[in-house]
């Protein structure tokens, strides 16, 4: 019995070491699935969770591009810009939690989200909450910095709609682009048929597509 007890006790440090190693490994994996500036999920992790939200019931897909962000970077520096992006990411994450959704930073000052909605009235209220959260001032080094947002949105019902997440994001992106050019806070897709072509897998006209330009923030 004493031999077995001794062996068991001797194995405790090894077991503890493996547990600590596994914990560190899980943390590294989780960190790799997060945007380092905002803490939001990366695209792959977002897509995995977004599809589950869409399959769960009536939802909406949003593409969000900040307005006047370039002016903050140019006037106050990139550190201030990073602070605004980080604060916006946190506010969007809180908004998504309330609405049973998920948010991703697509890059720069652009975000996407999928969240549950139950009616057109609910969607309008949710969009109002979203834009109000983004427009709240961010205090950086004693300065009050404010941005707005152009939001494109498309509603989705798994019982009647047969389009994938990629198409929904493309539709929301088209509406965001139109909202930015029209000065509207948001615009909603009226149907599930994309209106613009694609180049390199992205909406034609986006930065990064051949000969394309993007609306300035």
Image (cartoon, grey):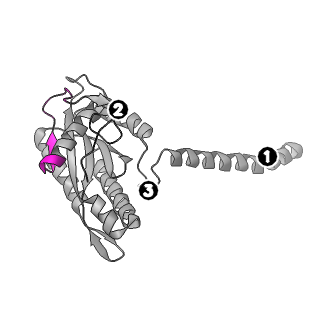
Residue located 20% across and 50% down the image: 150
Residue 64's disc number: none
Residue located 17% across and 38% down the image: 118
Locate residue 112, reporting x and y percent.
31, 44
Dot 2: what SS? helix
| Nearest to N terminus: mark 3 or mark 2 | 3
Give the mark toward the camera: 3 or 2: 3
Q: In the rendered view, does 106 fall on the left or right side of 121?
A: right
| Circle 3 residues within 10 Å: few <14, some 14–19, many ≥20 | few
Q: Label 2 vs label 1: CA separation?
A: 43 Å
| Nearest to N terminus: mark 2 or mark 1 | 1
Which residue in the protein does label 1 denote?
11
Dot 3: what SS? loop
The question of residue 60 being in magenta is answered with no
Residue 37's disc number: 3
The image shows residue 154, relative to residue 21, as above or below, that is above
Identity of the residue furthest to the front in this view: 211
Q: Label 3 vs label 1: CA separation?
A: 41 Å
Which is nearer the eye, 41 or 143? 143
Quarter location, residue 214: top left
Q: In the rendered view, does 144 fall on the left or right side of 18?
A: left
């Amino acid at each position: 019995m004493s031999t077995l007890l001794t062996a068991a006790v001797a194995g405790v440090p090894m077991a503890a070491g493996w547990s600590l190693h596994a914990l560190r490994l899980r943390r590294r994996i989780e960190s790799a699935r997060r945007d380092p500036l905002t803490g939001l999920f990366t695209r792959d992790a977002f897509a995995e969770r977004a599809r589950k939200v869409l399959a769960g019931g009536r939802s909406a897909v949003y593409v969000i591009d900040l307005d006047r962000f370039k002016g903050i970077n140019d006037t106050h520096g990139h550190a201030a810009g990073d602070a605004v992006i980080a604060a916006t990411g946190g506010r969007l994450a809180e908004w998504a939690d309330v609405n049973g959704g998920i948010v991703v930073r697509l890059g720069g000052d652009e975000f996407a989200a999928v969240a549950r909605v139950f009616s057109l009235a609910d969607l309008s209220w949710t969009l109002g909450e979203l834009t109000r959260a983004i427009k709240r001032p961010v205090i950086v080094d004693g300065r009050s910095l404010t941005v707005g947002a152009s939001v494109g949105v498309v509603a989705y019902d798994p019982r009647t709609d047969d389009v994938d997440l990629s198409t929904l994001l493309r539709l929301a992106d088209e509406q965001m682009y139109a909202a930015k050019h029209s000065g509207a806070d948001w615009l909603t897709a009226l149907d599930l048929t994309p209106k613009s072509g694609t180049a390199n897998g992205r909406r034609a006209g986006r930065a990064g597509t051949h000969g394309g330009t993007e609306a300035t923030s």
